[in-house]
Amino acid sequence: MIHEQSIFVNEDRRDFLFYGSLEMVRSDHTKRVISVLAVIVLVFSMFSFPALAEESSESDSATETIEDLGNPVVGLLDPDPYGVPVSGAHSYLIYDTLSDTMLIGKDYDARREPAAITQIMTVLIALEELELSDKITITKDMYESIPKEYVRIGFTEGEIITVEQCIYACLLKSANDACMALAIQISGSESAFVKEMNSRAEELGCTSTHFTNPYGRSDDEHKTTCRDMALILKESLRHPDFRAISTSASFTIEPTNKFNDKRVLNNANRFVSTPSTAYEYYIGGKTGYTENAGYTIIAGAEKDGRCLIGIMLGAEDAERRYEALVDLLEYCFNSYTTTMVEENEMEGAVNTAVAQIGAALSETNLSVSETSLSICKYYSVKSDLANDGYSNEVDLSELVIDPKKDVQEFVLPIYRRFSNSEAYRIGDLKIVISNGTVVPVPTEKAEDASEIDIGSILLIVSIVLVLTFILILAVILLVKMMKKRKFNKHHRNPTIL
């Protein structure tokens, strides 16, 4: 389309220059004026004809666009994995962030109490809305309501601390008073912040999460799922500060206006602090525990360009949860492959499908007038399948065309089929079939384009008016110059001998 538009514009400019040159005369003055007019006409053509060319491009019979398609896999990629490690938890999930795919899991949509991994959401909102250097003045409502058996840093009323210190205290020590300080600093009250937590969770795609407090206090109404928490951590890991803080071995809070000693915070997460359970691919996460929730853990791991998130809710053993989660993450790194889908890989399958449809329509007045492609940017598959090769195909089995309808739209799934005949949906081909005379109902995007055309028309009209005015001035100037020349010719000064 761009190439045809350029040709159209260039041909029109050449025509105008040619016709303009036929009007040139020998008079020097006239040549100058006509030259000016020619330039004006050239400028006019530059402004007006691209718009005409754009209009002509809209009538092209077939167009193709590429759009991103979300992961079409519903549920687990592998519902019955072979040789999967034992989790030791009521619920677990391993999630691939690149392909947006849940690889393996158990009861991953069961609603359970998350305990202190709740604080990931509080920290996420703090990173989004506050600066690390912002000051917080501690008030009683930031710590008085916290149960005595819950972890605290021990902030006192009137003490001035920073957002950064609070985030370190949350992620390294599960400090509930630091978490409350962030919540009230952001929203003014715990209840107002909880509303913001739930709203943000919904924005991230969480469908089964309801928070009642910022730090994970045990509550029958305070529940989430493995799937939802994976989405929350995925967003948190987009923040470099979250990664850096949650993987720090320790942090020191310097003396404040109310506390004279240093507070040294050692990371309680054994992926960082304990050599026997350290995990080199760990990039951030959190642990938690309450009597009702049991042991909880969530972690991101990055390896060979891939990022997986593992989460366990209701684990039975504090130390075993680390080992089990590493086993599950490593199982998925080794058993599944995540690959980028290249647009040019779809060309053969799309051309074949369009040709087959065209052949079927050969005895009608219908034809494929538009095509558009939506593909997954990444997809995950079992590693053994990926190594044996694959083919791409457009599924035409459900395509039913009505020869009496002028315009019809269809969305055809595109599958990647592997050597064992197992197929994964990796995209959609949208086609419009019409008789070539009826224009499809404009989409929202097309309406925006029409508004731009109206603006272009108004601009052209304004330019025409200005150029017309300039042309009139040029003609007047030409007439005056010719009269002056004629006067000088007949009223020369007398010659003195």
Image (tube, rainbow, N blue to C red):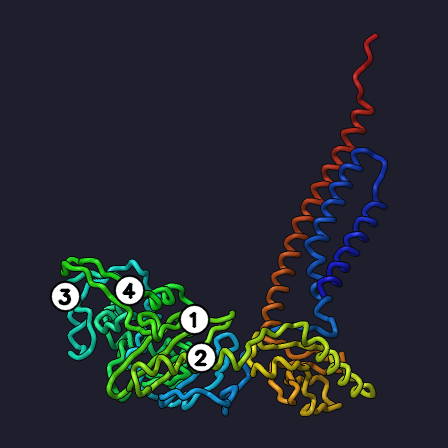
Frontmost of labels 1 and 3 is 1
In three-dimensional space, the C-alpha distance between marks 3 and 4, rounded to whole angstroms, equals 25 Å
Q: Which residue is mark 3?
A: 157
Q: Is residue 210 left or right of residue 412?
A: left
Q: Earlier in the sequence, mark 2 or mark 1?
A: 1
Ranked by sequence position, the earlier of labels 4 and 1 is 4
User: How far apart in space, not on screen, are marks 2 and 3 (Cα)?
Assistant: 43 Å
- How far apart are the two marked residues, 4 and 1, measured between alpha carbons? 19 Å
Report the quarter where the C terminus lies: top right
**The image quarter in which residue 50 lies:** bottom right
> What SS does tag 3 mark?
loop
Residues tagged 1 and 3 counted as in contact (Cβ below 8 A):
no
User: In whole angstroms, how far apart are the C-alphas of marks 1 and 3?
Assistant: 40 Å
- Report, in whole angstroms, how far the alpha carbon at label 2 lies from the one at label 1: 10 Å
Report the residue marked by disc 2.
329
Alpha carbon of mark 2 to alpha carbon of mark 4: how far?
A: 25 Å
Compare marks 3 and 4 and give the one earlier in the sequence.
3
Q: Amino acid at mark 4?
A: Ser
Q: Read off the residue under disc 1.
A: 281
Q: Secondary structure at mark 1?
A: loop
Q: Is residue 262 left or right of residue 83?
A: left
